Amino acid sequence: MRSAKTIHVISCHAEGEVGDVIVGGVAPPPGETLWEQRSHIANDQTLRNFVLNEPRGGVFRHVNLLVPPKHPKADAAFIIMEPEDTPPMSGSNSICVSTVLLDAGIIPMQEPFTDMTLEAPGGLVQVKAECRDGKAVRIMVQNLTSFADKISVPLEVKGLGTLTVDTAYGGDSFVVVNAGELGFAIEEDEAKDLASLGVRITNAANEQLGFRHPEVPEWNHISFCAYCGPLTPMTNGLTGKSAVAIQPGKIDRSPTGTAVSARMALLAAKGEMSVGQEFKAVSIIGSTFLGRIVKEQRIGDRAGIVPEISGRGWITGIHQHMLDPDDPWPSGYRLSDTWGA
């Protein structure tokens, strides 16, 4: 077999959402900071296209690049490549990266718990992994500071009229809508409709509401639409279903760690959650993340929280992605049947 490049990947999923991890074959991108390296990957597109486009990738896939950390306190660093964005942070992807680092022996595993500091483009995240019999069985991630942005504001969506929505940040940016008011119970057979409508809502929110991070002004858009189901009390907090529509039009199979963080920030801002309380988020396929408000913390001029999210990850395979020098589609391709219009 001949190949102009060979990229080594360990495939993984966190509570259903694919988050593959590149462990070799890619040199660290240029940049003095991890954010600059992220920006190079986002702007250059070469690596993103190779691993995310068909025939190697697909709209269902996220891919993470392991790179040497820039921060002296970090044990490892990763850059997240989602179908359309290269975000500051991702909950499911951080769980996949942590699982691969430990289960593949890249970072030595300590039982019953291994503590790690990971550097995401948006900042440092603390990880505590519950480990048993050589397997990381649950990953707890202390996420970036999260905050409510706009609460109960009107949003005009063509064909729907005026919705009342919230916007928030949980390591990534969201427009948050009431699923029941739109006729959704967040069931598997609704996935296609949730995805296509979610893209329309996200696009409308970017046009009418906008977003700007107080400390990272380059992050100036809303990435996702989060559909939230009704809340039910539990012993130390709340539980509820949710589904996140990801550009260009797919539903996150996991409960979306950044969405859990954003929702807890909104619940705290509305006085419905407080420090120490938990939120159990249930995904469209029935998988769960457990969120907890660790503490209150301001970010710029905004009140915010430090959230913790936890979930499980599983390695699904080892791959070597190659490029035949004669392949007429070296960067792959996208078609609107899966990638949207």
Image: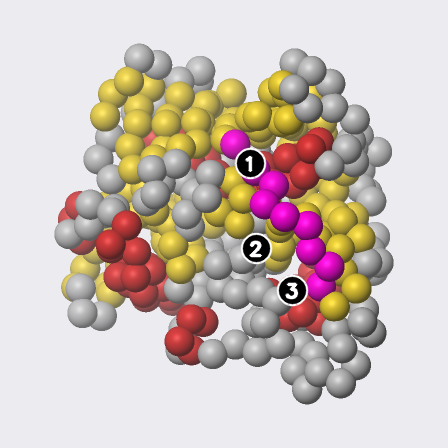
Q: Is residue 235 magenta?
A: no
Residue sitting nearer the eye, 73 or 108 = 108
> On the rendered image, what quadrant is the C terminus found in?
bottom left
Q: Is residue 41 above or below residue 117?
A: below
Q: Secondary structure at mark 3?
A: helix
Question: Identity of the amino acid at label 1?
Answer: Gly
Residue sitting nearer the eye, 204 or 302 = 204
Instruction: Tell me which corner region of the image, top left, top right, bottom left or bottom right, holds residue 38.
Output: bottom right
- The residue tagged 2 is 62
- Image coordinates of residue 229 in percent, x first then y, are 24, 40
Question: Identity of the amino acid at label 3?
Answer: Val
Write down the region rendered in magenta: 312-321
Question: Identity of the amino acid at label 2?
Answer: His
Q: First in sequence: mark 2 or mark 1?
A: 2
**Residue at 52% across / 76% down in the picture?**
334
Q: First in sequence: mark 2 or mark 3?
A: 3
Structural distance between the alpha carbons of marks 2 and 3: 9 Å
Q: Is residue 18 above or below residue 125?
A: below
- The residue tagged 1 is 313
- The residue tagged 3 is 51
